[in-house]
Amino acid sequence: MNSRGYKEWGIRSVILLIGLVIAHFGVTLFLLSDLGSDPFNVFVQGVFGKVGALLPAGVLSHGRTHMTISFFIIAILLLVDKRYIKIGTILCMVFGGPIIDFFSWALGFLIPEYFPLWMRTLMLICGCIILAYGMTIVIKSDAGTGPNDLVAVVLSDKSHKPFSIVRLLVDGCFALVGFLLGGTIGVGTLICIGLVGPVAGFFLPRNERLVQRILDEYVS
């Protein structure tokens, strides 16, 4: 790879990290609304409940289950089409948790312990929109994206179906399977299923143009 190629990848990685921060700010608002888990974590919760019950206490945790499932998704994608696994996939896995922890700490000083339901619902909706916007920046950075988001990206590409519809169906499947395994679905889960995919479908072409403008300006 020549110097231009390294510069382009550097800029794409920065764009990805910016999108990751935006997306996980949205995730934090979602979590702080306390109206239910996102669909993927309902799935993780269900798997953890079933598999964890078969193992000695303390061997498995929600976080370890999340990581194990993520690695399993990566392994499958490496067999299906390894081009989807890029440096950004690792960056999303490494930095996602700490970013959420930081925003949870920072917002903890600003958000009172008790919010009325309508304010928590509004916070959840805003979180889903911000998450979808940041996620599309990550996807269109073309530097890789998180394993759970890659499921919808790959299925959309391979089926030639709109990402918005595929994402909605994938989120619905994650939530349904997780629920059948014993996970808990809340009103926030349902709002997330219905909102993130369509909003992401709206922002994807716009952020594709935004990323291209940045590359045209800074990569010579």
Image (spheres, helix red, strand yellow):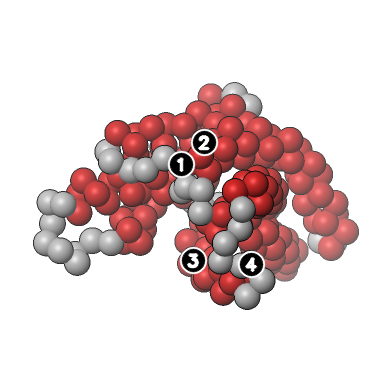
**What percent of the width, then of the height, locates residue 71?**
36, 54
- Seen at 19% across and 66% down, the residue is 58
Per the image, label 3 sits on a secondary structure element best described as helix
Q: CA distance from mark 3 to mark 2?
A: 23 Å
- Name the residue tied to disc 1: 186
Please report whichever mark, 4 or 3, sits nearer to the chain's N-terminal start. 3
Check whether the beta carbons of the residues at disc 3 and disc 2 lie within 8 A of each other: no
Amino acid type, residue under disc 2 in the picture: Leu
Residue 137 vs 202, above or below: the answer is below
The quadrant of the rendering that contains the N terminus is: bottom right
* Left or right: 66, with 12 as reference point: left
Query: Which of the two residues, 124 or 209, is positioned nearer the viewer here?
Result: 124
Question: In the rendering, which numbered label is found on residue 190?
Answer: 2
**What percent of the width, then of the height, locates residue 29?**
61, 57
Amino acid type, residue under disc 3 in the picture: Gly
- Seen at 28% across and 61% down, the residue is 61
Per the image, label 4 sits on a secondary structure element best described as loop
Query: Which of the two residues, 105 or 90, is positioned nearer the viewer here?
Result: 105
Please report whichever mark, 2 or 4, sits nearer to the chain's N-terminal start. 4
- Seen at 21% across and 46% down, the residue is 50
- Name the residue tied to disc 3: 97
Q: CA distance from mark 1 to mark 4?
A: 21 Å
**What percent of the width, then of the height, locates residue 219?**
81, 61
- Name the residue tied to disc 4: 111
- Seen at 69% across and 37% down, the residue is 199
